[in-house]
Amino acid sequence: MIFFQIFLAFFIPGILGYGGGPASIPLIENEVVDRYDWMTVNEFSEVLAMGNALPGPIATKMAGYIGYSEGGILGAVVGVFATVAPSLILMITLLGLLMKFKDSPRVKRLTIVVRPVIAVLMGVMTYDFVFSSYEGIGVTQTILIGGISFVLMKKWKIHPAYVIAGALVYGALVLV
């Protein structure tokens, strides 16, 4: 029964908490503190502070911790799954609809409109990355890392994950 309660405690805020983790925090607090009485308000605020201090989504970290404290490792797995399940279900449903109507003229027009927007957003993001890199490590290092990365991926067909890992190692060893 505890695993079902853990699931509900994080699934319901995931459905109702439009806006991601920060928007669902009060809903999670209602479930964890008021409904199931697993924690006090003070304990919940400490878990929230810990979740904010660590990198990654707040709600999933809290679900893992609270699920673990209430149901062990399986409780943590159930809590994290319940947090991501609403988004997962919605994505699968929307992908199914998109695949069903992929030949529809409306969907094709939507795709034609969305692609340039995504390209512009990617371009802006790239510009922001390059500019922050230029400010942080200088123009020489930025050009060096960018040029070597480009050659590794385009000429030698090295997977981008390895190039990113190599750039991280280079940054840790040389640029610190």
Image (cartoon, helix red, strand yellow):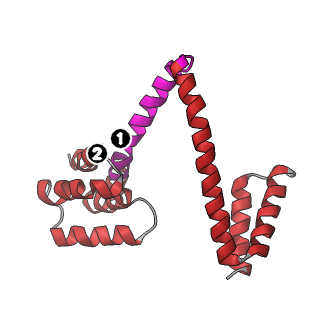
- Within 10 Å of disc 1 (Cα), the crowding (few <14, some 14-19, many 20+) is some
Q: Residue at x 46, y 24 (%)?
A: 97
Quarter of the image for residue 164 reads: bottom right
Compared to 173, does 89 lie above or below?
above
What is the secondary structure assignment of the residue under circle 2?
helix
**Label 2 crowd (10 A; few <14 / some 14-19 / many >=20):** many
Q: What x and y, as percent, mark residue 100?
A: 50, 19
Contact check, label 2 and label 1, Cβ < 8 Å: yes
Q: Which amino acid does label 2 sit on?
A: Phe
Q: Mark 1 points at which residue?
A: 86
Quadrant that contains the C terminus: bottom right
State whether residue 86 is above or below residue 50.
Answer: above
Amino acid at the residue labelled 1: Pro
The part of the image, by quadrant, that contains residue 41 is: bottom left
For residue 53, side relative to residue 144 (left or right): left
Residue 60 drawn at (x, y percent): 37, 56
Identify the magenta region. 78-105
Q: Position of residue 128 (x, y in %)?
A: 61, 62
Residue at left 81%, top 69%?
144
- Secondary structure mostly seen in magenta is helix
Residue 11 circle label:
2
